[in-house]
């Protein structure tokens, strides 16, 4: 079944930084494209916005997540550090595990929403 209801996981870290699906997607695309510019373009983001987010991600933790290479004959680029790869894997794992843990509740919400539109009121869950 295709689910219209979406679950979005965002982590509010103790240092005030936030880690959510947008930053995780940017990390993944930097790793895939080898470029902050190309990663930003892939999600319709300006280079400046992508660069600012990449810089923010690098300042969130003690270790940087993204490395950059300056241009020149071989050209510039960017990629994920070993820590960045672990961070991305962690984000993906947390997202996947939260979806698995909440599947029944999300199914119930979808059904309740559909029943509401069909009958006017959702049934109450069997929760005490």
Image: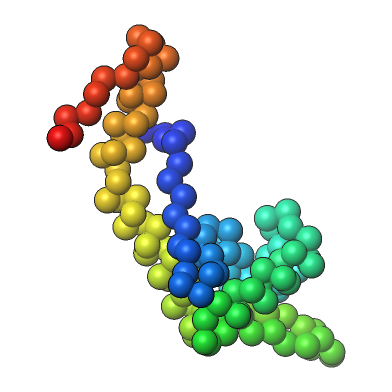
Residue 40: x and y in percent read 71, 63
Examine the image and state in which quarter residue 118 appears: top left
- Indicate whether 59 appears above or below 99: below
Left or right: where 50 falls relative to 4? right
Residue 109: x and y in percent read 34, 31
Task: Looking at the picture, tell me which residue is in the foreground, 41 or 111.
Answer: 111
Task: Looking at the picture, tell me which residue is in the foreground, 57 or 16.
Answer: 16
Left or right: where 127 falls relative to 62? left
Q: Quadrant of the C terminus?
A: top left
Q: How is the image coloured?
A: rainbow
Residue that lies at the very extreme toward the right in this rendered image: 72
Task: Looking at the picture, tell me which residue is in the foreground, 13 or 33.
Answer: 13
Kindly identify the residue that appears in the image at 35 percent across and 9 percent down: 119
Q: Quadrant of the N terminus?
A: top left
Residue 103: x and y in percent read 30, 43
Residue 74: x and y in percent read 79, 88
Examine the image and state in which quarter residue 92 appears: bottom left
Kindly identify the residue that appears in the image at 52 percent across and 81 percent down: 61
Examine the image and state in which quarter residue 112 appears: top left
**Is residue 21 visible in the rendered structure shown here?**
yes
Q: How many marks?
A: 0
Residue that lies at the very extreme toward the top in this rendered image: 119
Kindly identify the residue that appears in the image at 33 percent across and 25 percent down: 111
Kindly identify the residue that appears in the image at 67 percent across and 68 percent down: 53
- Indicate whether 39 appears above or below 104: below
**Is residue 38 visible in the rendered structure shown here?**
no
């Amino acid at each position: 079944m295709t689910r219209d209801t979406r679950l979005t996981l965002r982590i509010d870290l103790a240092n005030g930084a936030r880690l959510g699906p947008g930053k995780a997607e940017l990390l993944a695309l930097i790793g895939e494209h080898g470029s902050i510019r190309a990663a930003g373009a892939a999600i319709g983001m300006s280079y400046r916005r992508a660069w600012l987010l990449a810089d923010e991600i690098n300042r969130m933790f003690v270790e940087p997540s993204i490395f950059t290479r300056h241009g020149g004959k071989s050209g510039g680029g960017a990629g994920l550090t070993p820590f960045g790869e672990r961070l991305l894997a962690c984000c993906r794992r947390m997202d996947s595990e939260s979806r698995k843990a909440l599947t029944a509740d999300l199914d119930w919400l979808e059904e309740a929403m559909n029943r509401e539109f069909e009958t006017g009121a959702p049934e109450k869950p069997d929760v005490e």
